[in-house]
Amino acid sequence: MNTNIRIQSFGDLLEVGLQQAEPQRLLLVLLKAEPEDEATHHNNGEAIEGGGLLRPVMATDRELTEELRLDALVEEADQSGLSWDLIMVSSLSASGGRLPTEEEAEPYLKQMAEAVEMGADLSRYAVFDRAGSPVQLQTRMTS
């Protein structure tokens, strides 16, 4: 596998996942970005700058298929009535050609949500905005 792949959109992530030898189950955690203060703002609708907190609001998983689309995921998430800003993604690979079940994915989803709640390093996860653009998060240590 090429480890120098640059993911520049949610679509790129899906494409790379579909190229894997084993089937993949995507793990998705929706996050609400809560500004720390009024100085935090949106820059042309593309990025949140400044400080703030992330809060997990929903976690789910989906089998990675060619039919999976971000716009459908966004629509489904919005129908839940929960307010969210970012989507954090990871994946589980199949073992011996068998796709992990939803039950097998659950502890990993819980671990992802807990990492957000604890302010842990999230660099091992891909994070995207609602439009599918990648978002870079920086953890700030508080004293």
Image: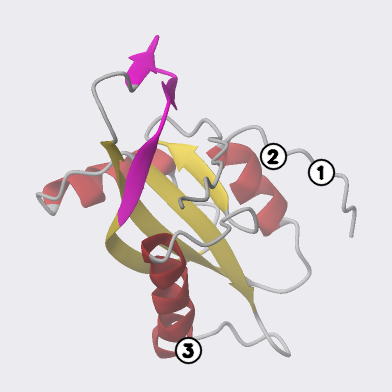
Residue 39 appears in the rendering:
yes
Asked if residue 54 is among those painted magenta in the image, a careful observer would answer yes
Q: Find disc 3 in the rendering and name its residue.
A: 104
Residue 48 picture location, percent across and down: 41, 26
Ranked by sequence position, the earlier of labels 3 and 2 is 2
Secondary structure of residue under mark 3: helix
* Cα distance between the residues tagged 2 and 1: 6 Å
Q: Find disc 2 in the rendering and name its residue.
A: 7
Q: Quadrant of the N terminus?
A: bottom right
Residue at image position (56%, 41%) is 138
Residue at image position (17%, 44%) is 83
Asked if residue 125 is among those painted magenta in the image, a careful observer would answer no
The reply to whether dot 2 and dot 1 touch (C-beta < 8 Å) is yes
Residue 41 picture location, percent across and down: 33, 18
Q: Observer-nearest residue: 96 or 36?
A: 36
The residue type indicated by label 3 comes to Glu
Residue at image position (48%, 34%) is 132
Residue 9 picture location, percent across and down: 59, 34
Main secondary structure type of the part rendered in magenta: strand
* Cα distance between the residues tagged 3 and 2: 26 Å
The part of the chain drawn in magenta is 41-55
Residue 68 appears in the rendering:
no
